[in-house]
Image (cartoon, rainbow, N blue to C red):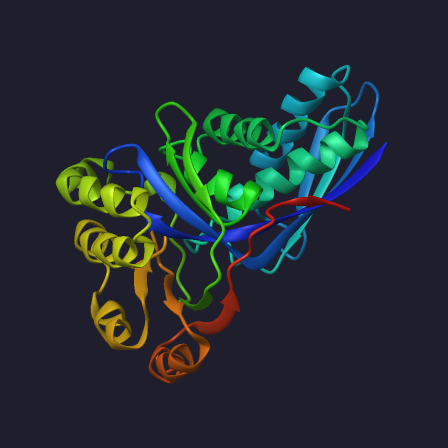
Amino acid sequence: MEGTAAAPAAGTILNALATGTGAAFAIDRYTTAHVSLEAETGVTGEVDGAPDADTRLIERCVELVTEQFGTGEGGHVRTESDVPMASGLKSSSAAANATVLATLAALDTDIDREAAARIGVQAARDVGVTVTGAFDDASASMLGGVTVTDNTKDELLHREAVEWDVLVWTPDEQSFSADADVARCKQIAPMADLVADLALSGEYERAMTVNGLAFCAALDFPTDPLVEAMPLSRGVSLSGTGPSFTAVGDRETLERLEDHWSNRDGNTWLTTTQNHGATQK
């Protein structure tokens, strides 16, 4: 019994750490999972190109799916990705979504995509790699487009397809969301409420920029990339708990911004939004 699936990365509109309400948008970079199931074995995992990577999340995804929709099969899951790990681009959500869908494919089982995303969220909580549960990130990756969610209830509040070019700057360092200073983030809750209001009214780009300024302050990231981007984009934000920054707009002006961001250490790249979400192969 074998299955393969791919799920996109995502950028942040509203970080859910302050209030539990979050918003994200899928981008055209992917994590792919390959699952092979066997009866009466444990679950093992590997991340291609990263032999020391923590595989508990993808292993737990397989376990949860086979417990609910199979007979507790074990097996092996391998992921490969062009999404940098611990960069704020939802690599964990993409890996979880891809693994859940690949395991369902191996079982020849189809379920509602929102429900599938919630399985990955539960796995992330079970292994302690998320603070909020990250249903905003998981839903954007699973469904595509922009999603706004209540992460305290794993409830989808709004979804919309968007057509943006996206510029990403990813510094060389890593930042793990489970290590974020949640208490400090909660202090900016009034700003997060404003961002939520903007996002729910469809003003996603303005919401991003306010979020970026607020969470750079709360998480002690530089605001210089935001200031550089404001004249050359429709919206810009710290993505997740960093260290990546994402800017959205039209390609011509983002290429001008790319000239600025490329002078910084790390990797700068152009992509687009993605509106169809995760897929089985």
Along the line of sight, the residue nearer the viewer: 59 or 272: 272
**Which residue shows up at 75% across the image and 35% down it?**
76
Task: State left or right for residue 158 relative to residue 222.
Answer: right
Task: State left or right for residue 38 relative to residue 213.
Answer: right
Along the line of sight, the residue nearer the viewer: 262 or 255: 255
The quarter of the picture where residue 136 lies is top left
**Which residue shows up at 45% across the image and 77% down it?**
251
**Which residue shows up at 24% across the image and 33% down it?**
19
Residue 224 vs 63, above or below: the answer is below
Task: Give x and y (percent) for residue 242.
Answer: 35, 55
Task: Give x and y (percent) for residue 198.
Answer: 25, 47
Q: Quarter of the image containing the N terminus?
A: top right
The quarter of the picture where residue 174 lies is bottom left
Residue 247 vs 125, above or below: the answer is below
Residue 207 in sight from this viewpoint:
yes
**Which residue shows up at 63% across the image and 28% down it?**
112
Residue 128 vs 246, above or below: the answer is above
The quarter of the picture where residue 264 lies is bottom left
Task: Give x and y (percent) for residue 43.
Answer: 71, 29
Residue 171 in sight from this viewpoint:
no
